Amino acid sequence: MPPGFNLPFVLSVAGALLTSAVVASIYVWPFVRAMPRHDALRLLAAFHAFRFLGMNFMVAGFVSPELSPDFASAVGWGDVIAATLALISMAALSRRWSIAVPTVWIFNVWGTLDLLNAYYVGATKIQNPGLFGAGIYIPALYVPLLLVSHVLVFMLLLRPGSEAQRS
């Protein structure tokens, strides 16, 4: 294993990702796929509206002062953008704006890439997950839930016949 590789943390994240996927496939997907497309997308986007939580990576005392400020800033601002795009998507879907689905695509692509980038940078640059302090639960629990939710949004957006379900 590479130096600094933290197997317990990696297993924790992997377990949360697997559990999130199983719960989503058993309980969430059957529910949202039966909903009208706009309503299902709005519900899933609402979960991402709470991504303002990522700003806590820039709060002194929430994370270790040794955590890279560049990493903390990238994570925090990336999440603010994702949360804002989720809120805009929710408004567009609620009002049935013609740009609603393209807005959801933008939100979902941005949000997914932001999370994957944060994991990549965190895994390659942050050798000690203990530097996340109280924020350890964000990458260990909340991010796997968000990633699975993004997959569900992609499944709805790419679903055959979903154009007919726009109402």
Image (cartoon, rainbow, N blue to C red):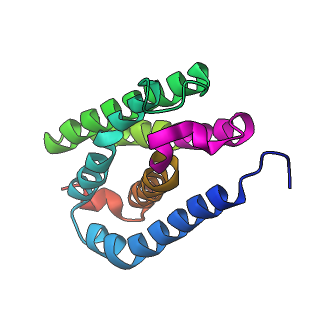
What secondary structure predominates along the stretch shown in magenta? helix
Locate residue 155: give its quadrant: bottom left
Left or right of 2 on screen, residue 110 = left
Residue 152 in percent (x, y) is at 42, 60
In this view, 28 is above or below 71:
below
What residue sits 43% from the left and 28% below the top? 61
Residue 33 in percent (x, y) is at 31, 69
Residue 14 in percent (x, y) is at 60, 63
Locate residue 124: give its quadrant: top right
Locate residue 167: give its quadrant: bottom left
Stretch in magenta = 113-137
Left or right of 63 on screen, residue 40 = left
Q: Furthest residue to the bottom?
A: 26
Viewer-side residue, 166 vs 48: 48
Residue 97 appears in the figure: no
Residue 79 appears in the figure: yes
